[in-house]
Image (cartoon, helix red, strand yellow):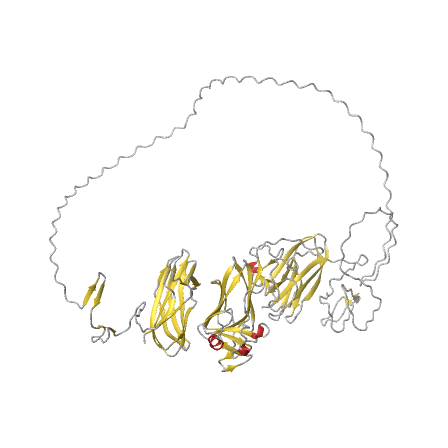
Amino acid sequence: MSNLIVNGDFSTPSLPTTFDYSIGNYVGSNSYIYYNDLINHTGNGIPYWNIFSNNVSIQNGVTVFGYPDASGISTNSQYVSLQLACSITQTISITQSGIYSLAFYYAGRDGYNFNQTKIYFNSVLIDTLSTYQSNWTLYTNNIQVDSSGNFDLVIQGTAINDDDIAITSISLTYALPINYINTINSAPANNLITNGNFSNPPLGANSFLSANKFTSNQLQNWITDLSLNTILFNGIFYNFPSITNQYLGLFNSSYATQSFSVSTSGSYILTFQYASTISYNSGSLFISLNSNLITTLNFLNSSTYWNTFVYIIPSISTGTNTISLSGVNGNSNQAIAITNITLSLLQYPNSYVPIPDFSMNHLQKTSVYGSFVVQNKYSSYDTSGNPSGSIVDYGNSIFYGNVSINGLTTFNGGVTGIPSGPTGNTGSTGNTGSTGNTGATGNTGPTGIAGSAVNTGATGKTGATGSTGATGNTGPTGIAGSSVNTGATGNTGATGNTGATGNTGPTGLAGSAVNTGATGNTGPTGRTGSTGNTGATGNTGFTGNTGATGPNGFSYFQPYGTTGIYYSSGNIGIGKNNPTYTLDVSGSVLANSYSLVSSSASIFQQAVTGAGSAHGFPSGTTQTIGINNLPSGLYIMTFSLNINTTGTGSTNFTNMLYSLYSSLGGPYYAENDNHIFTIAGNSNSQQTRSCVVNNVGTNNFTLSITPTYTTTATSVTWMSLSSVYPTTFLQFTKIG
């Protein structure tokens, strides 16, 4: 399945023909433009993306922002920048459930703090980026989608100050079905390793699967550390070179082990392909057999192609063995990719059985640059490495595999070829011929000089085995004796009637029980004193008549219904004895909300989100509500925030920090509300605040809300449910 994200590299619109307001004319590469200016000057935004806030800009190349060059990872070298609190959203149509692979590149801005960025999928927070990266860094994650439908991918910057992040090359691809059932295959012929090419589970093109998403035995017999440090790939990721089959990435100290069964002991040859990446450090891969280190592969991160590793294991015993490839104790931030792993019995032509000296060095690389000299082996060496003892082995060399020689070469003593082409299919076993005569044992050749293996003289033919004497004939079987005839069995007689049941005998005498001692008498209970008589209750006197109601006293306020009062005319002063307005207050007014009724008032309102949606409201993190292009004037700012909990636990709020910022600075308004309130499980609370704002010029306003609470509920969200609760909103009502 192809990439489900459209315009994920932000190559449209192409900036070489786009207005850059920071310069004032049309420019080519190394340019940028903010979202609102893009709308104003082109009439279009960023196709397929919904943008919240003008803090989003599209950029090309290396701009004055100082982000690294994106030419190697993005079409047209373009990307988006998220400053302060803002977000980008794309709605994705998914036609089948499964495990999906989300990937993109991101980088920080030189000289600025990193904008901590939250990633939501269908309103569920799946991850938070919080670590500054000076270079473009690949982000990978797997998402489980349980059904088909439309889903929103939201990438949201959360900073209050001018913190920044750049993002490009966003992709979402199908990896494999949910709960994929893996068929366990046996190891291939001549290879003890199962699934050495990591073809199972089969992933979709250009996808990956992190080990924390592996189900039981999903890599067949491979066991890994089940973390984000182990990833199965199908395609090019993290700058690993291209290869046709799937491969396993081992990052940092991750590992992969497999147990296998050996039926024939002997020397075995281990081979696999490996690759490194410039995105990570050089490092070491430690290879162990049965928890014993047998060799170490040191690799450089500068390699741009797949290499082949070959190692001969001198001896593996029969039974169950375990091989391990591990980055434990390697370099920090190292990475290596492996695939096509084989382990097979080392076999030689019948006429050549070498006796290897395993104390000598083994060449694990097949390329030798410069002069190559094979010297004799001595019994001892001095501290400088020079030979000081006698020769114990001559400078003979044995080459396993093909040898290519370019240039003038002289061989003294001839060359014996030991080809090791591919092993053909084993033919059917022919019929066993008759055993020939064993020849006489030949004379034993003289013992060769110690050191290099001198060929032993040919073994004489085995002498013929003497003939086995003929087996005598088996005598005839004697005649069986006749059996005496047994007379016929007589018929069984009829069963007689059952006799009458006899009388039951008398019951025997019961055994004597040991006498229990007599229980002592209970002492007498003393008498209870008599209760005195209660005196009679006197009669209640008559209630006197209620006196007549006196006349009403004078008041400027008149009753309105049963719960209200009103003032018919004049002004009312609070703290003032000469009020000049209908209500004239000397001092501050505290109210949960304001309602202004005026035919001339202008109301600017921004709902937090559409009806029926909810957003996570974590304790200690900041949420934002914004409104753009507010004209100059005097306003009453009002916001209403609905808080909802799910689950049976309660939530205790200890503080709510509200801060109102404009595009020119701020805060205009800040309140640290220590009012403590509690929300029970599966319930809702509405919090409303108001203040007066004097706006100079046309500005964009953002309200930041930071809650502090403890909870045992399943979730705490801030919501907009206009059909159930009052709408969550930020509103500016113009009053002057």
In the visual, does 338 lie left or right of 96? Answer: right
Please state if 530 lies on the left or on the right of 362 as rendered: left
Q: Nearer the viewer, residue 581 or 645?
A: 581
**Residue 593 visible, this angle:** yes
Quadrant of the frame with the N terminus = bottom right
Front position in the image: 542 or 53: 53
Q: Residue furthest bottom?
A: 24
User: Which of the image's four quarters has the C terminus?
Assistant: bottom left
The residue nearer to you, when weighing 602 against 549, is 602
Q: Residue 148: x, y in percent?
A: 52, 58
Q: Judge from the rendering whether residue 199 lies leftward or rightward of residue 119; answer left or right.
A: right
Q: Residue at x 50, y 69 (%)?
A: 49
Residue nearer the viewer, 2 or 457 = 2
Q: Quadrant of residue 481?
A: top right
Q: Residue 198: x and y, percent?
A: 64, 59
Is 106 left, or right, of 486 in this rendering? left
State the image coordinates of residue 687 (x, y, percent, origin top left).
Answer: 35, 65
Q: Would you identify the image quadrant in which residue 703 lies?
A: bottom left
User: Where residue 208 sits in the image (x, y, percent)?
Assistant: 59, 62
Would residue 134 be seen by someone viewing this image from the given angle? Answer: no
As displayed, is residue 587 above or below residue 353? below
284 in relation to 353, above or below: below
How many labels, in total?
Answer: 0
Q: Quadrant of residue 557?
A: bottom left
Q: Image point 44% across, 21% down: which residue?
A: 507
